[in-house]
Image: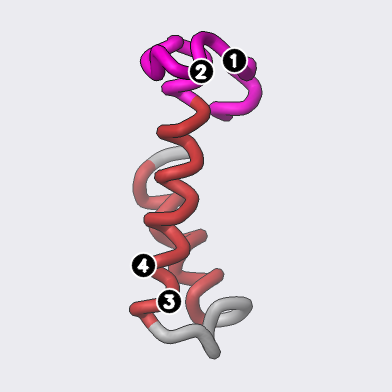
């Protein structure tokens, strides 16, 4: 997907499905999802010595 196509798609989502959700909530939800992706990456790379390696690459995706 090209950049313009991605932004067009996001604009359509924002004006339809996400129209009733305020920007602050959207930003917080994005941050939450980013945090989950980071945790999954930490798991597959074993960067947390207390937990070791866990999870799969599919968890990150």
Foreground mark, 1 or 4, reads: 1
CA separation, marks 4 and 2?
Answer: 29 Å
Marker disc for residue 27: 4
N-terminal-most mark, 3 or 2: 3
Q: Position of residue 9 (x, y in %)?
A: 51, 60
The magenta region covers 41-61
- Residue 24, x across and y down, in percent: 34, 78
Which dot, 1 or 3, sits closer to the camera? 1
Residue located beneath label 3 in the image: 25
Q: Are marks 4 and 3 in contact (CB under 8 Å)?
A: yes
Instruction: Specify few, some or many for label 1: CA neighbours under 10 Å numbering under 14, 14-19, or 20 or more.
Output: some
Instruction: Point out the residue furthest to the bottom here.
Output: 20
Distance between mark 2 and mark 1 Cα atoms: 7 Å
- Eyeballing the image, is 32 above or below 12? above
- Real-space Cα distance between discs 1 and 4? 28 Å
Magenta stretch containing residue 59, yes or no?
A: yes
Q: Quadrant of the C terminus?
A: top right
The reply to whether the C-beta atoms of the residues labelled 2 and 1 are less than 8 Å apart is yes
Which secondary structure, mark 4?
helix
Identify the residue at horizontal 42%, vertical 44% (top origin). Answer: 35
State the CA–CA distance, disc 4 to disc 3.
5 Å
> Mark 3 or mark 2: which is in front?
2
Q: Give the quarter of the image for residue 50.
A: top left
Colour scheme: secondary structure
Residue picked out by circle 2:
51
Picture residue at 39% right of the left edge, 66% below the top: 28
| SS for callout 1 | loop
Magenta span includes 56: yes
In this rendering, the label closer to the viewer, 2 or 1: 2
Q: Which residue is mark 1?
A: 54
Q: Quadrant of residue 13?
A: bottom right
């Amino acid at each position: 997907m090209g950049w313009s196509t991605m932004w067009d798609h996001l604009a359509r989502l924002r004006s339809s499905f996400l129209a009733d959700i305020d920007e602050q909530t959207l930003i917080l939800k994005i941050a939450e999802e980013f945090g989950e992706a980071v945790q999954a990456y930490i798991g597959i790379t074993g960067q947390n010595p207390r937990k070791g390696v866990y999870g799969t690459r599919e968890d990150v995706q």
